[in-house]
Amino acid sequence: MSAISREEVSHLAMLARIDLQPDELDRLAAQLDVILDAVATVTQVAGEDVPATSHPMPLTNVTRPDEPRPCLTQDEALSGAPAAEAGRFRVPRILEED
Amino acid sequence: MTVTDTTEAVLAYDDVVAAYDPVLGLEVHVELNTATKMFCGCPTGFGAEPNTQVCPVCLGLPGALPVLNARGLESAIRIGLALNCEIASWCRFARKNYFYPDMPKNFQTSQYDEPIASNGFLDVELDDGSTFRVEIERAHMEEDTGKSTHVGGSTGRIHGADYSLVDYNRAGIPLIEIVTKPVEGAGERAPEIARAYVSALRDLLRALGVSDVRMEQGSLRCDANLSLRAKVPGAAPGSAQQRAVPLGTRSETKNVNSLRSVERAVRYEMTRHAARLAAGLTIVQETRHWHEDTGITTSGREKSDAEDYRYFPEPDLVPMSPDPAWVDELRGTLPEPPPQRRRRLQTEWGFADLEMRDLVNAGAVELVEATVAAGAAPAAARKWWSGELARRANADGVELAAMPVTPAQVAALQGLVDAGTLTDSLARQVLEGVLAGEGEPADVVESRGLKVVSDDGALGAAVDQAIADNPDVADKVRSGKVAAVGALVGAVMKQMRGQADAAKVKALLTERLAPADSTTDVSTS
């Protein structure tokens, strides 16, 4: 059973900003199917008595006090940036002109 | 295509409300005034050098782990309680995935289908004193984004920019997003109700002490959704018959950053929607940008599948399950609701409705309250703040609360007037000295030599001089034309350079000019 369509892969690729070629869409759709099927086997094991869970640890309410901690310096913050200007991260223009 | 010069047709407002029923949806983002960000210990102060209040967590560096700010959670719950919401007994954060350089993680940590607070309401007082209830859908926790500066292009706006520069100091500052249910039944008052809601919410958040609520600095931001549907002839705006008509397509006007703009933007969108509908066109569901200068909105990006956020529970933050006893404790910390508080103070102070409204609009209620607490009579406190100080604040273009004078100083100044040390006009000169940073009122009285002269010798000499200088006037008074004494009072005040009590001067003059057999009333009142 094919759960993932070629269109869905194309849509996800667009959302993830990954440029995929037509042959890659077909190949990845098939591979994603296999991955989803593998994960789906979990549902065969989990009965109605096992609730869906998002967190593996039975923890709640982990907070920290509202007290400032040291920050990075501007130079440290920008040290990994491909481009910087005026103390800020320089990024390509955000929207294409339409 | 350039977006800024698109002018759309609008319909006259009276025609809009005659044919259509407006439905509002208001989303308000409020930045909390916590000392640190929502998920890391970076400080939140406004105006720091760019990218100096950042760390691996808020820069989204690999491996960095967020931890929730306890005070952020507490503020969120208090806001929820103040909005009469239910507080979730268990809820989680979610990742809102999108690619935009203002969030370096490529997702915003937010809440999706499990908000901390839901199903509340806020009663909003309108200008005519009536109350309109706005239902609250939810209030949820999230984080603010970084700040982008668009460089190049002709307009400095996002469209046409060559590149953008991003400062992440603001990224991660705690935000609470408060979303109304569709606001129905507003009718022709929709623009006013939108403004009054944001105003009431701002007052409430200020009273809670959870935010600076400065719209001009962006710590309170409003997005206004509006749709129109056909008006049912003869049906009241909020009637079941009118509510049965399906909602129209909405537009969302972003980041309207003043109360006045909220009202104007809603009104404009109503006239724009109506013109399209009347011409048989459809409404495009889209984001609109409000332009303060021209008073119109223009199209932003259309809602499309690019806004497929693929929410999922945030694995790096554990669920929240606030202890009901703690929630009850927080309920006990809620302030008196601002409208009730205003009514109570108005009664205590004995102010007329208009006087009180002026104080509220001037942002002076707290200032007057503090001035009264420091010992001034309410009427005198009101006179200073909504008179002389409001005038000066207005002239200087600053908020009243930002004037460099404290309520205690205003109370001390009034105390000097009450004690007869200063006349009103001298007190205004002393205030000028206080505002100029010359010290406390008493210091300014000394340094500027502004005290009322109460030395009867000096005053008596000035009175005698005035009588001698104006024999004709003096004769008139002696012959019974008591009103003529005003000219002599003026002469004495001039000689005393204003530093005399006019009532006392008048009494002295009347006494000296009374006919020997007179029964003239020398009362100074």
Image: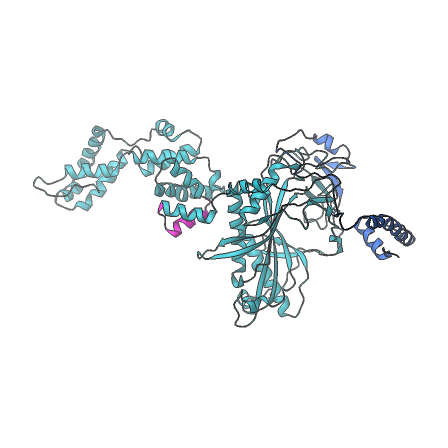
Chain colours: A blue, B cyan
Query: Is residue B151 visible from the viewing direction of this image?
Result: no
Q: Quadrant of the C terminus of chain B?
A: top left
B87 sits left or right of B61 in the view: left
Residue B239, percent across and down?
Answer: 54, 67
Predominant SS along the magenta part: helix
Vertical side of B242 occupied by A2: above or below:
above
- Residue that lies at the very extreme toward the left in this rendered image: B517
Vertical side of B115 occupied by B416: above or below:
above
Query: Is residue B464 visible from the viewing direction of this image?
Result: yes
| Residue beneath the point at 64% across and 39% down | B173
* Front-most of residues B251 and B91: B91
Residue A49, percent across and down?
Answer: 75, 49
- Residue that lies at the very extreme toward the bottom in this rendered image: B233
Q: Is residue B107 a member of the stretch shown in magenta?
A: no
Image quadrant in which you'd find residue B498:
top left
* Front-most of residues B99 and B331: B331
Q: Quadrant of the N terminus of chain B?
A: bottom right
* Front-most of residues B378 and B445: B378
Vertical side of B102 occupied by B464: above or below:
above
Residue B364, percent across and down?
Answer: 44, 43
Residue B385, percent across and down?
Answer: 41, 42
Q: Which residues are magenta?
A: B349-363
Q: Is residue B354 a member of the stretch shown in magenta?
A: yes
B418 sits left or right of B136 in the view: left
